[in-house]
């Protein structure tokens, strides 16, 4: 059945729902502000009925950005206890404070968990010391994006096209 999404929303959950729907053909997904007149919408309906698909370039860009963001979601790579630890680490707590807050036996348990976080986020091989790894983990947590660092220390994030660009 042909579908036309005629949207004024710019909310990531709508783009996620679209990606999750699995609709590959017979659709048009357009931003209402770009297709105001019936004469602009009717051809989209005809195309959808004919099995062709169209996505507004503005929406395509946002859909791809959300897809990449979800693929790069750093917290999705962590176990629940690791998420708890990195949340407190990002607030500036010491290992001892984190252990007390989470009722861990001692700070060594937090150190082991930190190591698992660093490994999941690729910080275990690229950092010189624990302080650098903590700072980088905090930045990843607070931005909610995967970040890689060049040999010269430049942080990079992926753009909507999948290219790694400087964060700042």
Image (cartoon, rainbow, N blue to C red):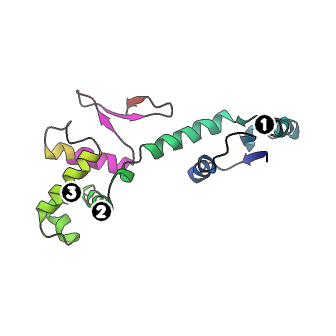
Q: Quadrant of the C terminus?
A: top left
Does label 3 or label 2 sit earlier along the sequence? 2
Check if mark 3's residue and mark 1's residue have beta carbons within 8 Å: no
Dot label at residue 103: none
**How many numbered marks are there?**
3
- Determine whether, in the image, residue 36 is placed left or right of residue 97: right
Give percent across and percent down for residue 151: 23, 27
Is 149 contained in the magenta span?
A: yes
- Displayed quadrant of residue 71: top left
Q: Is the residue marked by circle 2 packed among few (<14), some (14-19), or many (20+) residues within 10 Å?
A: some
In the picture of the structure, the residue carrying the numbered disc 1 is 51
Please tell me which residue is depicted at 28% across the width and 47% down the height of the picture: 120
In the picture of the structure, the residue carrying the numbered disc 2 is 84
- What kind of element bears circle 1? loop
In the picture of the structure, the residue carrying the numbered disc 3 is 113
Does label 1 or label 2 sit earlier along the sequence? 1
The nearer-to-camera label among 3 and 2 is 3
- Determine whether, in the image, residue 24 is placed left or right of residue 40: left
- What kind of element bears circle 2? helix
- Residue nearest the observer in this picture, 167 or 148: 148
- What kind of element bears circle 3? helix
Give percent across and percent down for residue 96: 13, 64
Distance between the alpha carbons at the discs numbered 1 and 2: 47 Å
The nearer-to-camera label among 3 and 1 is 1
């Amino acid at each position: 059945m042909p579908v036309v999404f005629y949207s004024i929303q710019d909310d990531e959950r709508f783009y996620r729902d679209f990606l999750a729907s699995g609709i590959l053909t017979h659709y048009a997904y357009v931003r209402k502000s770009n297709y105001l007149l019936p004469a602009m919408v009717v051809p989209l309906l005809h195309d959808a009925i004919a099995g062709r698909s169209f996505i507004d370039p503005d929406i395509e860009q946002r859909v791809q950005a959300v897809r990449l963001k979800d693929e790069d979601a750093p917290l999705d790579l962590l176990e629940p206890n690791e998420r708890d630890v990195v949340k407190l680490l990002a607030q500036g707590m010491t290992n001892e404070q984190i252990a007390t807050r989470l009722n861990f036996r001692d700070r060594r348990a937090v150190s082991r968990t930190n190591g698992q976080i660093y490994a999941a986020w690729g910080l275990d091989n690229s950092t010189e010391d624990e302080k650098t790894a903590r700072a980088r983990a905090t930045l990843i947590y607070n931005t909610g994006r995967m970040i890689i660092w060049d040999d010269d220390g430049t942080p990079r994030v992926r753009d909507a096209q999948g290219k790694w660009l400087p964060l700042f």
